[in-house]
Image (spheres, rainbow, N blue to C red):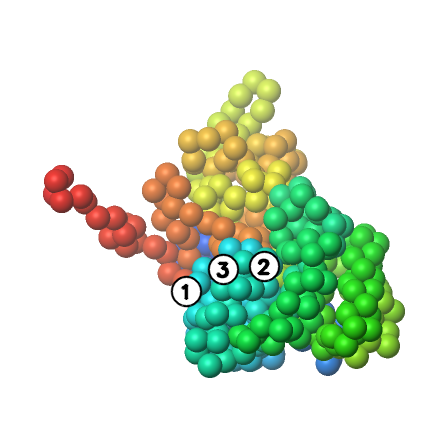
Amino acid sequence: MHHFDYRNGLLHAEGVELGAIARAVGTPVYVYSSATLERHYRVFKEAVGEKSHVFYAVKANGNLGVLMTLAKLGAGADTVSEGEIRKALAAGIPAGRIVFSGVGKSAEELAFAVEAGIYQVNVESEGELEVLSNIAEQRGRRQAIVLRVNPEIGAGGHAKITTGGAANKFGVSWSEAERLYIRAANMPGVAIKGLAVHIGSQIFDFSALETAFRRMRGMIEKLAAQGLPASRLDLGGGVGVPYEIGYPFSYGTDSLQAYGRMVREVTAGLDVELGFEPGRLIAGNAGLLLTRVLYLNERADRTFLVVDAAMNDLVRPAMYEAHHEIWPVTRKPDAPIRAYDVVGPICESSDTFAVERELPELKPGDLIAIMTAGAYGASMSSTYNQRLLVPEVLVKDQDFAVTRPRQTFEELLGTDRAPGWLA
């Protein structure tokens, strides 16, 4: 389901040869495919039903071009900060299609969300509920909310992206949810609409999701029996994407269709609007990190392939021990295969993209693509080691545009201020 392919031995993003992007923009650089973003959104929307709300998780990739592409398809936005709300609005996503999640929303952020008129706030604690109600009441409004409940069922591809367990910080506890729902129903500044749940990320076995969703259904039915109907059920995101994709790439839609069937079975007969918050599923395989080989460092027992991208550009391998496929931009079928440790320039041993990865023989100056880097790549990048933030490029058919230029050293230094006694 992605649109990166070899043509005459050269790796392309849709109709654009990646070498042309490297020559025009330099490396490292993120490259995104519009066609993949569009297809992933449409396939997911079809799987969960056209009447469902799809709120793209901006934290996965907040690039303005990516958001504008999805906005044109009718996507909403799942946001976790005022900055993400502002970015979604700037991309043309209406406030009425924006939800605000997160455990630590500040009073200033909540005020901004209320004044912007967003679709809903996913409330995650009693303290937040009180603050939000006061803010909205002072402005003569009642903010639509859902209560995010921790179902005490965690799942995900790594402990750091599991969010639904009892020990995780997200949501109100299961034992307190009913009491807080009743309290919210009687508060002047909020209009409680329903419930939300999200148990983790990178999930392929849907059994834990189904168990969590059934728990939410049971709570909705229990609340309705007390005269407290829920009209919305936000089921979060979390469906996994393949990182070990290989070439040629092949990934059907069977898993998404199975997910959609499971959701319909669990929610059958419930009179609720369903909401979903996919992020990685939309953007993950829609992007790659293009980087150039700088040096080969030969050792007796291994060869280090040193590239110009680093862990500050793509932190997932260092942070999550994550696997990313690596493809040469120029395909040479007859090239001998060698094992490389693919590493970056940062002064940490954790700055490693792959260990003993078998690749066609490479030399300094060659381009390689680190695949499935469209989600939690650029969005988690930093200026560690005072390295510049890398550019982002969006491809559409035979055209490409720089949607975030490479940071300059003047911009990097311009964020600092010297203290008066040292100036």
In whole angstroms, how far apart are the C-alphas of marks 1 and 3?
A: 8 Å
Disc 3 target residue: 105
Image: 389 above or below 132: above
Q: Secondary structure at mark 1?
A: helix
Determine the CA span between mark 2 and mark 3.
12 Å
- Residue 119: give its label: none
Give me the disc on residue 108: 1
Query: Which residue is found at the position 57% from the left and 32% from the top?
Result: 341
Does the residue at mark 2 contact the one at mark 3 (Cβ under 8 Å)? no
Q: Nearer the viewer, residue 69 or 13?
A: 69
How many labels, in total?
Answer: 3
Quarter of the image containing the N terminus? bottom right
Residue type indicated by callout 1: Glu
Horizontal side of residue 160 vs 367, given as left or right: right
Vertical arrangement, residue 157 with respect to residue 235, above or below:
above
Which residue is the extreme one toward the top?
300
Q: Nearer the viewer, residue 99 or 413?
A: 99
Give residue 375's position: percent from left, percent from top.
58, 56
Element on which disc 3 rests: loop
**How many residues crowd mark 1 within 10 Å: few (<14), some (14–19), many (20+)?**
few
Q: Is residue 157 above or below residue 9?
A: above
The residue indicated by pointer 2 is 126
